[in-house]
Image (cartoon, grey):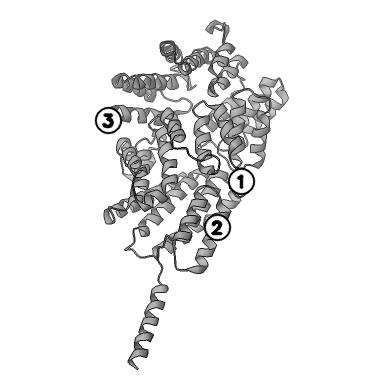
Amino acid sequence: MTRYLIFFFFLLTSLFVRGQKHFDFNTGCRQAYQEIIRLKLDAGQVILDNEKKKDPDNLIPYFLENYIDFFVLFFNEDPSEYKARKGNLDKRIEWMNEGPESSPFYLFTKSLIHFQWAAVKIKFGNNWAAGWEFRRSFLEVRENQQKFPGFPLNTMLSATMQVVSGTIPDGYKWLSNLLGIKGNIKTGMQDLSGFLILPDTWATLYHDEAIFYFLYLKFYIENHGAEVFAYIRQNRLDLRRNHLYAYLASNLAVNDQQSAYVQEIIRQKSSDHEYLDMPVWDLEMGYARMNHLDIDANVYLERFIRRFQGAFYVKDALQKLSWFYYLQGDQEKANQFRAMIQKQGSTVSDADKQALREAGSGVWPDKGLLRARLLCDGGYYFEALQCLQGQHTDNYTLPEQKVELTYRLARIYDGLGRQEEAIAAYLSTIRAGGTLTAYYAARAALQIGTIYEKGGDRKKAIEWFQKCLSLKDHEYKNSLDQKAKAGIARCSE
């Protein structure tokens, strides 16, 4: 009789334990995560579905499904998908709340879910809600650090938020005031760098995701573009089978004036249909082809406009299409795409704001200056310089065009490594363009600061970064201010 009672007791105990919600990042969940982080979302979902059937009380599969929502919404911005998926945020937080507080994943999962939805809500224009999501994420990971100081995933997330918070531009000061925190670029980047070399199971699992954060911050905040691409090459990041890496590299290359490299990345990435279908590939290729004045650039940009359901960079893409037809001599089509800028897309990004301003001005850019701009943006400096051979400010009537000439020459000289000529042209740009709404003077000040920083003269670098901040009411104000503040922070450490 005693034997049966003992057996019955253990049976009840095992059933009770099995019925408790828990966090088990088992082998199947790790495989699913690795598929998802490479943007093979369907393959990851299949594994998660199987894991949920095997252990319905394991909360990790539900946590990882948030990655799928995040990637779909962040990259494709489809309003219908957002409507269908936005309720998942509250559901997942409720599920995570059912897990044991004794696990470091109890707060970490909630913090990362809030972090991802903050980014999504910014994409859909809900900045206030995004601020609250970011704040929740910050508070949760900070609490988790206090409870589980040895849990490495806290470092990955908190360091990323710390770096970002240290460079919030004036246009988003409400967010930093809301958070009540001050970031530290140096500490945050050191923590992220340290995380990448930790001999730890969790650090190894989350290595790809941490690299994504690390390289973006190193590029945009630390302004170390050369180090970013050296890291990609030296660590042999898989740009073919990992589409998140491919996007990272191509997106940064577009912004680092490496259009030829952008095309190489996109053409060589795997075409397997298991990867998330993203119209952004056409946008990146369209930019790269446009920056070489290729006659098929419109094919990619028009396909992006047709397929993309979101709002970010739509106005910018339409501006590029208007320029394409303008340079081809098809003014009717150029006018059609310029008119579309007024109706489509959003004005969240500085590039979209600038496109809208130009469309409303009624003024078309000088064709020679425009060709030089595009070629310079693509990294084709010698070809860009040829476009401006024999040009002088006296050849232009509009003040903006006179300033643009000196600015374009400065950027070309800068790209060619002719620093003294670049600084002289940047100074001319600032003198002539300091009161204009065009961004040329502010960017010129930023570039001078960058030149001095690279040369080791931090004092002069800070002076020019501060000069950039002092210029008001110009295009790209938020993004240029963020870069200038990051420069000051770097040079002040």
Mark 3 highlights which residue?
A: 493
Q: Which residue is mark 1?
A: 277
Q: In terms of sequence position, does the residue under pointer 2 or pointer 3 come before the other?
A: 2
The percent coordinates of residue 61 (x first, y second) are 48, 60
455 w.r.t. 255: above or below: above
Question: Where on the picture, by quarter, is residue 13?
Answer: bottom left
Q: Nearer the viewer, mark 2 or mark 3?
A: 2
Task: Tell which circle, 1 or 2, labels the residue nearer the N-terminal end.
Answer: 2
Residue 404 in view here: yes
Viewer-side residue, 226 vs 68: 226
Q: CA distance from mark 2 to mark 3?
A: 45 Å
Q: Of circles 1 and 3, which is in front?
A: 1
What amino acid does circle 3 point to? Glu
Question: For residue 444, what is the image quadrant?
Answer: top left
Q: Are marks 1 and 3 in contact (CB under 8 Å)?
A: no
* Mark 2, residue position: 45
